[in-house]
Image (spheres, rainbow, N blue to C red):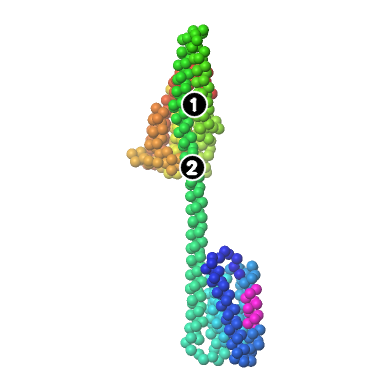
Amino acid sequence: MDTRAHTPVTTALRLCLHALMVGLLVLAALRATGDSDRHATAVVVVAGVMAAVYAAGVLASVVQPHTRAAALWLTALGAVWLALLALSPDALWVAFPLYFLQLHLLPVRWGLPAVAVTASAAIAAFLLHGQEVTPGTFIGPLLGAAVAVATVLGYDALFRESEQRRHLIDELVSTRAELADAERTAGTLAERERLAREIHDTLAQGLSSIQLLLRAAERSLPEDAPATAHVRRAREAAQDNLAEARRFVRALTPPDLQQGSLAAALSRLASRTSAADLTVQFVVSGRPVELPTPYEVALLRTAQSALANAVQHSGARRAEITLSFMDTSVALDVVDDGDGFDTAAEPVTSSGGGFGLPAMRARARSLGGTLSVESGPGQGTAVAVTLPLPAADGPAETNSDGTGNTEGRAA
């Protein structure tokens, strides 16, 4: 009759309803035979037919709430019940389980009138059979109808609320799992960036300095000096380990930077961020040069955080990313035409990438650069970060052969 999943409580209620229907039909049949009613045989037969019709509806998978099959089944059941009611006044008690069936299987706009008609038929049949009229003649069927209406409608309201809570819990569990995955990914990327910076700032720089010192020592020694060969081998070992350290740094860089240069990563960022209500343009100014990985990571993260603020908080319609290469510095500007804000009360964090303005300033400061913000209510926002280019003859720019030329990609 209803293939939806049921709890133990609802299953018990269904079984009680079946038992009540069968019990009342058996009671009507027994009273008719026990009182030597002249319609006893007919009462027994009609009660059996009604029990068969009821069982057929219970077992039929097509009989579901608010379906045509359910309405047809209730019509057939009601017709048999009216026939039984015409034969025996005891059949009026069968109206009580009929109330529950009508309210459960029919929409409310049809279920309530059906209950009213059933209660009226039960009272009318009792009067037509010439039974003694008492207040209970009217109160019994009407009170039973009221109890059935309150019970079914109350249960339906609780069921809907329970389903809403179940869906909400499922969504919360799913969201919590997605959040945990996102936090793990963010933590992994942050740790990879930290390791890349540490390796570059300590191990790679130290090996580069050692290589330069050993090369200077090698040049100052005569070719036939016993120490020359040892110094050369030491320089070559430092050179090999420097190359390996730089490979580690490249392997630990963010995925966006692994697929190409900083300009390509910023171009992809602009394309991903652009949408129907926001246009993001990317422009490169000056002659691009290779940048150390910490520079590229800092500039990429600054652009991501600034764009996240523009998308989520400013309501901007247009934004522009400009990467400028100058003689002694590199600059990144992110400008949008959004709502802007009071820079004296600038936000501490950015929900987009986890780096607020203070964190972006600290990142720029760690590389010897500066970050400035220009904004005002209704005036848009401009975020500019400037980093000094590393000296061309510094250790960070020395390639693996120690000649002082830059690599295809500096560490």
Residue under numbered circle 1: 411
Magenta: main secondary structure: helix
Point out which mark residue 315 bears. none
Work out which quarter of the rendered image holds the N terminus and state it. bottom right
Residue 265 appears in the figure: no
Label 1, secondary structure: give it: loop
The reply to whether residue 128 is in sight is: yes
Circle 1 packing at 10 Å, graded few (<14), some (14-19), many (20+), is: many
Above or below for 117 versus 232 = below
- Magenta-highlighted residues: 46-56
Q: Residues within 10 Å of mark 2 (few under 14, many from 20)?
A: few
- The residue that appears at 50% across and 14% down in the rendered structure is 230
Q: Secondary structure at mark 2?
A: helix
Kind of residue indicated by mark 1: Ala
Whichever of callouts 2 and 1 sits on the residue coming sooner in the sequence is: 2
Q: Position of residue 407 (x, y in %)?
A: 52, 22
Residue at x 48% of width, y 35% of height = 192
Residue 207 location, x and y as percent?
Answer: 47, 22
Amino acid at circle 2: Arg
- Residue found 54% across the figure and 91% down from its top: 131
Give me the residue at 57% from left, 81% from top: 24
Question: In front here: 241 or 184?
Answer: 241
Front residue of 215 and 6: 215
Tell me the residue that label 2 is attached to: 184
Q: Give the image location of residue 2, x and y in percent.
A: 59, 68
Q: Position of residue 262 (x, y in %)?
A: 51, 30
The residue nearer to you, when weighing 188 against 315, is: 188
**Which residue, as the protein is rendered here, is positioned at the far left?**
344
User: Farthest residue in the front direction?
Assistant: 226
Is 54 covered by the magenta stretch?
yes
